[in-house]
Amino acid sequence: MTKIGILTGGGDCPGLNPVIRAVVRKGLNEGYEVVGIKNGWKGLIENDITALNLESVSGILPKGGTILGTSRTNPYKKEGDLQKLKDNYKKFGLDALIAVGGEDTLGVATKLIQDGIKNIVGVPKTIDNDISATDYSFGFDTALNTAMECIDKLHTTAESHHRIIVVEVMGRYAGWIAIEAGIAGGADVILIPEIHIDIEEICSIIKKRHERGKLFSIVVVAEGAKFKEGSLITQEQRLDEFGHVRLGGIGETLAEEIEKRTGYETRVSVLGHIQRGGTPTAFDRVLGTRFGVRAVELVKYKKFGRMVALVGNKIIDVPIEEAVRALKTVDMELYEIAKVFFG
Ligand code: F6P
């Protein structure tokens, strides 16, 4: 009997459980045995797997997070881990592996394919929506709607108190959440990692609003945004296994600068992991389900080394390599649209 494994790696996001459910349901329909690898690549290194059946995926569709757990473990980081992973892959008798993750997890998948574990299929997930070759990764829509709702809430209090509120959202290298939540929530300024922050320009936009009687402003900033000559603002310098620092803090710095330069009271709200939690939107449930079913079809037709992707409204498949080669940053046409509403 064909045996397939599924793992979820990297930061969690809403929509992972719909993918797991779809892989199990479609896999069982095809007569496959499906096993779940716990905590991303860590489970393959540490021999931590669990059988998945109808019962294990019952009721998980609306749940955020992942029933399999996740981690940022990188098998290429610690001496000996790659060999352990390869040995366990063989020991479990896996015929194929479905890796659900972002640039890091899928980057490992690409390397493993080159290193002999060829039967891998990728599924793109991330709230940052920065994976190339797919219009959307699931998780993004839920995070976007969460951020938009928060901006709506902050709007009313900012207006009542005549304050500037800086809303810091996630987005490490790409400002998709900031730009779309900012447009949807009617932000007065949106700052993204793709464009350096010009503090003079921001303050002048806010001052002009005051001159026309708007005594409050909403400034949305992505955590990965940088000042013109500055570096990334981080919570700490320690790197994770993929070499990333823990971001966070740009909102605070920005608020201080705005208050200093304009004299207007400025507060900060950091949305953080709230954006990664909660029940997936209908869009993310449907996308996760479509991705999961198609991933099993790729296994069935032995289309390995491929990742499922959404292009237009069609699910297609692309080489995993193509998806991880470069990050998908914010479309400047969209940024120009957002700019119409600055001020
Ligand atoms: O990659 C998704 C993401 O949510 C980023 O926007 C953010 O910088 C990072 O994960 C946070 O990761 P962690 O949960 O490990 O702190």
Image (spheres, grey):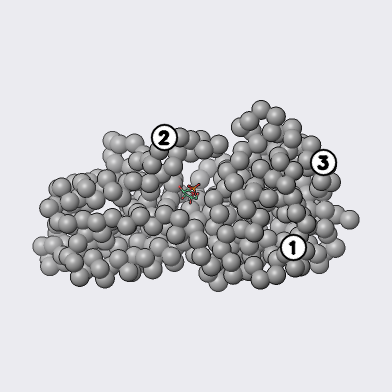
Disc on res. 24:
1
Q: Compare marks 3 and 1 and give the one earlier in the sequence.
A: 1
Q: Where, by quadrant of the figure, is residue 159 drawn?
A: bottom left
Disc on res. 90:
3
Element marked by disc 3? helix
Q: Which residue is mark 2?
A: 237
Using the image, determine if residue 261 lies above or below residue 136: above
- Cα distance in 3D space between marks 2 and 1: 40 Å
Tell me the amino acid under the disc marked 3. Answer: Lys
Q: Position of residue 191 (x, y in %)?
A: 32, 52
- Asked whether residue 314 is in view, the answer is no
Q: Compare marks 2 and 1 and give the one earlier in the sequence.
A: 1
Point out the residue furthest to the left here: 211
Query: Looking at the image, which residue is at 59% across and 66% down?
Result: 63
Q: Position of residue 173 (x, y in %)?
A: 44, 45
Element marked by disc 2? strand
Relative to 17, is 340 on the left or the right? left
